[in-house]
Image: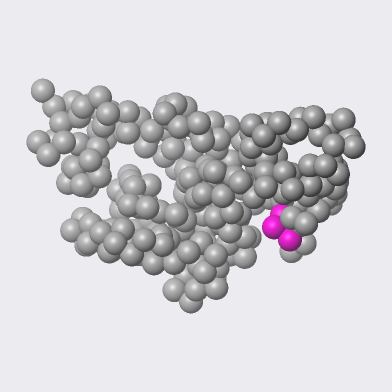
Amino acid sequence: MTEKYDIRPEQSVELLKALHILTRDGKLNQDSRRKLKQVYHLFNFIEPLLQDALQAHPEISLVDHGAGKSYLGFILYDLFFKANAPAGSIYGIETREELVQHSKELAGRCGFGGMQFLNLSVADSISSAALPPQVDIVTALHACNTATDDAIRFALEKRARHIVLVPCCQAEVASVLRKNKQQALKSPLAEIWRHPIHTREFGSQITNVLRCLQLEAHGYQVTVTELVGWEHSMKNELIVASYKNLPRRKPAERLTAVLGELGLQELGERFYTSP
């Protein structure tokens, strides 16, 4: 028996088959039901942001960094754009050319004319003429290490209304903590990251703290939560930032103070606060 009640009436069955959420005969199995649960959970976070952007203008734009097979972009287009924002655009940014080509072909088969896919790194996308000068929403799910920071820089450069991040594999801060460990050990607080496993875990944690402070220092309101239903991955921290033109001075000062306290001053350019 096909479990059609788990799929929304407006969803493209052909797309769900192509994304392996449905089997070839249109059925759901345990693994695909889990994927669908994850999709809906993430969509529930992003849909209000899309609605907010749509109130401002009909030609809304979303840029998805580290898109992979553009799983997120296709689902967002299918569930929201095709009915509510037909004049809108989704851009999938991906470095693997074969995945970009595959996504282009799938969008063509589905008739998703507002989807574009670019073979670019996150860093290169900042200056690419193929992207608009301003975008509404920026997403980066599991963009590894500094690619998440590049996505933040992209969002700041493009004056994004909303930013949705699920950070992954943060190694840069941990490497600097490790390098400066002897100097840092003069402070009792350095016991927090003295052991290698703690260096790695604390480095990951403090990376996201610094990212949140950076976004606040640019006027964003930041919410940090977790993606329920992503238990298969330890990287399930979700950062949602919305531009509210909030006061910037205090978070900028705190960011600088944290960098100084932890011996991370050399990362000041990475976590820049000036407009």
Residue 205 appears in view = no
Check if residue 200 falls in the magenta segment. Answer: no
The quadrant where residue 13 appears? top left
Residue at image x 81%, y 53%?
A: 265
Which of the image's four quarters has the C terminus?
A: bottom right
Residue farthest to the bottom? 129
Relative to 158, say whether 84 is above or below.
above
Instruction: Find out whether residue 272 is within the magenta segment.
Output: yes
- Is residue 229 placed above or below 96 in the rendered structure? above
Name the residue at 30% across, 48% down. 78
Whether residue 39 appears in this view of the structure is yes
- Magenta span of residues: 269-273
Task: Give the image location of residue 242, x and y in percent.
Answer: 61, 48
Judge from the rendering whether residue 80 lies leftward or rightward of residue 233; answer left or right: left
| Residue 87 pos. (x, y %) | 37, 62
Camera-nearest residue between 199 and 257: 199
Q: Is residue 255 left or right of residue 15?
A: right
**What's the residue at 54%, 31% (across, down)?**
226
In the rendered image, residue 115, in percent from the top left (x then y), is placed at: 33, 61
Q: Quadrant of residue 39?
A: top left
Q: Which residue is at 51% across, 62% downward?
A: 122
Camera-side residue of 58 and 29: 29
Residue reaching furthest to the front: 182
Count all numbered tags in the image, as a single digit. Answer: 0
Q: Is residue 262 above or below residue 77?
A: above
Is the N terminus in the top left, top right, bottom left or bottom right quadrant? top left
